[in-house]
Image: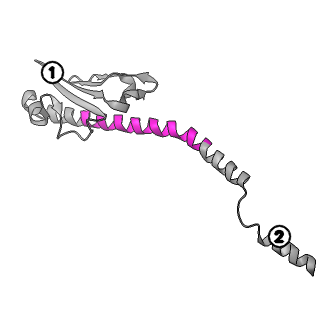
Amino acid sequence: MHRNIKRQRAYHHRHGMTLIEILIVLSIIALLSALAYPTYQEHVLSSHRRQALLDMARIQLYIDGHASVSQAIASITEQGQCTKFCNTPSSQYIIHITAHPSSYSITASPQGRQRHDTCHADDYDALIVRSNGEHEPKSCW
């Protein structure tokens, strides 16, 4: 009977995790975080780029739906920069619309951390859409 009491006490006091078990769990969490974080960052940059591309497409549709290109551009820009019409924050991309005599171009320049974005491993300085439908860089579209 004395032996059963010692076993019950020994078993009763073992209710937690040991330091080694906690360290193993923490190291697994750290490893998974180290692997997942770069992928998460790439996804965030990519989603910001997609928002800028959507805004550029909306601008192109808006301009093409108006008879006067210059009036359409003036109605959605302030000094050539898309402000109210665009959903892309200016901390990520600055979107400019430039009118030419017979055409126009829409340029989205990355800002801040967005400058580290790549399109399928290609670096770029700006996203460009021209009125004739040309897009640059090709890998981003």
Depth check, front residue: 61 or 112: 112
Expressed as whole percent of the image width and height from the top left, the position of residue 102 reads: 12, 19
Expressed as whole percent of the image width and height from the top left, the position of residue 11 reads: 81, 70
The residue shown at (9%, 32%) is 74
How much space separates mark 2 and mark 1, taking CA atoms?
84 Å
The span shown in magenta is 31-57
Depth check, front residue: 82 or 37: 37
Q: Is residue 23 left or right of residue 114?
A: right
Viewport quadrant of the N terminus: bottom right
Which quadrant of the structure image shows residue 101?
Answer: top left
Within 10 Å of disc 1 (Cα), the crowding (few <14, some 14-19, many 20+) is: few
Expressed as whole percent of the image width and height from the top left, the position of residue 103 reads: 15, 21
Depth check, front residue: 64 or 41: 41
What amino acid does circle 1 point to?
Ser
Expressed as whole percent of the image width and height from the top left, the position of residue 37 reads: 51, 40
Q: How is the image coloured?
A: one colour
Q: Is residue 123 left or right of residue 12?
A: left
What amino acid does circle 2 point to?
Ala
The residue shown at (78%, 72%) is 12
* Residue receiving disc 1: 103
Depth check, front residue: 141 or 132: 141
Does the magenta portion include 109?
no
Q: Which mark is residue 10?
A: 2
Q: Is residue 12 left or right of residue 44?
A: right
